Amino acid sequence: MPDATLLDKDLQYKEVRGLTRGLNLIKALNRIPGGFASTSELARACGIHRTTAKRLLETLYSEGIVQPGGRDGQYHLTQEVRQLSEGYRGDRWIAEAAAPAMKASVKELLWPSDLATVEAGWMIVRESTHRWSMLSQHHAMPGQKMPLLNTALGRAYLAACNDDELDALLRYLDKHAQAMGIEPKDRLNVHQLIKETQQRGFALNQGEWSPESRFSAVAVPVISENRLLGALNLVFPKNAVTVDEMSQRYVPKLKELAQKIGAFSAGGPQH
């Protein structure tokens, strides 16, 4: 746990806005379907003036991070951007156990899958098969934040929590409800959702998360040696697959994948 005094001291330094905006441009380009975007599109996505975006993009170009391409005024990321993450070392169980198993599962599961762990009241996507699934309609999923109450990932995790962790998470959500955009009705229904999830044997979201209202998802917990590591989902357009078909054809395979990840993750994160 970082020293609170050190954290307070760090907060005294002012944000370097140019760096923040440059990083936001890289993130925005990473999310753009097809990978190409104009200066104006990126400026709108990042909430900055077009001239500022152009100046930052030219700086990134001079560093080899982006490259002009496609139609006039468009940019795309280069291979150089991968060096920005080469030094990152996440939990080994994700890289060594989850990622290979998830990639191998695409042939059977077909639909894209996300693996997420809980952090500060959110489910954070740590690995994803969207880049491998031909049925994916999403991009750049790792690092995305998913709400606990309105997503299948969050519901699967909450339904698998022990009483102490569940109580701690719900108290955290209550304390930060306004900042996290949690509606009172969602918080009031959480115990009913948990009960339904446990009885059904898997978590379900049928478009209740408003930013992704066109999509449904099913999810199951990932457990290793009685430790709850996270949750694993399958994402699909609401009208593409019925819940019955998903539960009969895909959920058993999703559970097998979660069990496989758990079995190879004995050194996973402690809670």
Image (cartoon, helix red, strand yellow):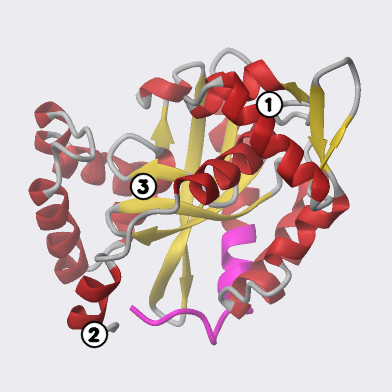
Q: Amino acid at mark 3?
A: Gly
Instruction: Residue 270: say if magenta.
Output: yes
Residue span colored magenta: 257-271
Amino acid type for the residue under numbered disc 2:
Asp
Chain-order first, disc 1 or disc 3: 1
Q: Position of residue 72 (x, y in %)?
A: 87, 16
Asked if one can make out residue 129 in the rendered structure from this viewpoint, the answer is: yes
* C-alpha separation, residue under disc 2 versus residue under disc 1: 42 Å
Residue mark closest to the camera, 1 vs 3: 1
Task: Tell me where residue 212 appears, x and y as whole percent.
Answer: 47, 23
- How far separated are the C-alphas under marks 1 and 3? 21 Å
| Between 185 and 68, the one nearer to me in the picture | 68
Instruction: Return the x and y of residue 43 as percentages of the image width and height.
Output: 58, 23
Q: Are marks 3 and 2 in contact (CB under 8 Å)?
A: no
Q: Position of residue 246 (x, y in %)?
A: 58, 32
> Which quadrant: the N terminus?
bottom left
Q: Is residue 147 magenta?
A: no
Secondary structure found at label 2: loop
